[in-house]
Image: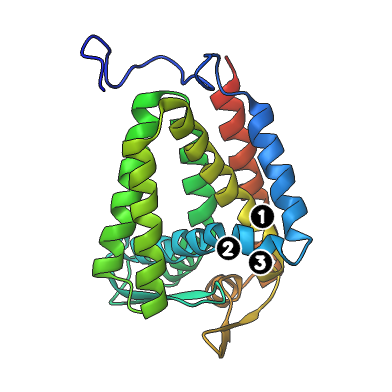
Amino acid sequence: MRNPNREPFPSHPLPSGPGGGTLGIGWLLGAAVVTVILWQVPWGQYILYPFSILATWFHEMGHGLTAILLGGDFHQLRIYPSGSGIAIHGGSLFLGPIGRALVAAGGLMGPPLAGAGFILASRQFRTAHYCLLFLGGLLVVSALIWVRSLFGILAITILGVSILAIALKTPQWFQGFAIQFLGVQACINTFHQVDYLFTRTAAIGGKSMLSDTGQIAQQLLLPYWFWGGLIAAASLLLLVQSLRLAYRS
């Protein structure tokens, strides 16, 4: 039962549990270490599968929303059971080749940017709560508007409803940990697929096509491995800086 004398969205830091105290960075570092270990064992891939699908969604939405910001059209996105995906956009983009390169980079930077934002939002219940509501709602809305593969519609809808349930039904400390955990997962997923950053072509939906770094290289001339290294460094910087800002107090 709700306590009428309690502020529903307090501005103070989130507690770590019923006993109070702020969420420690050790929890997140521990989660990151466990994630890396799980990557190394066959059954670990199944445990992390939902987070891989969510990272693919961040990636493809990054492409599509960047295209919209640059004056293009975001037609649809497809997510496959393998964890791969594709965003289809069209129209004329501002900045020409630079705009096309930015759309390609928007997908690669989507997960780390979202992850950094989640980590920063986690320090107060108000922002953590609304961030979960926004993420869950956007997942469901995107499944209705843009997702056009059957697997993608089912998976993204389930993820969206699950995150909304966390925002509406779980205690404050769990919401804070959930958004932080999602943030770390989004950031480090970039490094789980680091080989994709350093390849010119990739198989997506059973078809071979230019990778995102290959697309950037095609538009901006410098080799794909240069852009892969730059994006990997930027992703690491976002993770480190977001953790530093979130825990500097």
Mark 1 vs mark 2: in front: 2
How busy is the neighbourhood of tag 1: few (under 14 within 10 Å), some, or many (20 plus)?
many
How busy is the neighbourhood of tag 2: few (under 14 within 10 Å), some, or many (20 plus)?
some
Q: Nearer the viewer, residue 102 or 65?
A: 65
The structure residue drawn at horizontal position 69% and vertical position 75%, both measured from the top left corner, is 199
In the image as oriented, which residue stretches furthest toward the bottom?
207
**Residue 197 - label:** 3
Q: Give the residue pinned by disc 1.
A: 232
In the image as oriented, which residue stretches furthest toward the top?
5
Q: Which of marks 1 and 2 is nearer the N terminus?
A: 2
- Give the image location of residue 201, x and y in percent: 63, 82
- Give the image location of residue 61, x and y in percent: 39, 62
Determine whether, in the image, residue 30 is placed left or right of residue 184.
Answer: right
Determine whether, in the image, residue 114 is placed left or right of residue 25.
Answer: left
Q: Is mark 3 in CB contact (under 8 Å) with mark 2?
A: no
- Three-letter code, disc 1: Ala
**Residue 49 - label:** 2
Q: Measured along the vertical axis of the image, is residue 174 above or below residue 220?
A: above
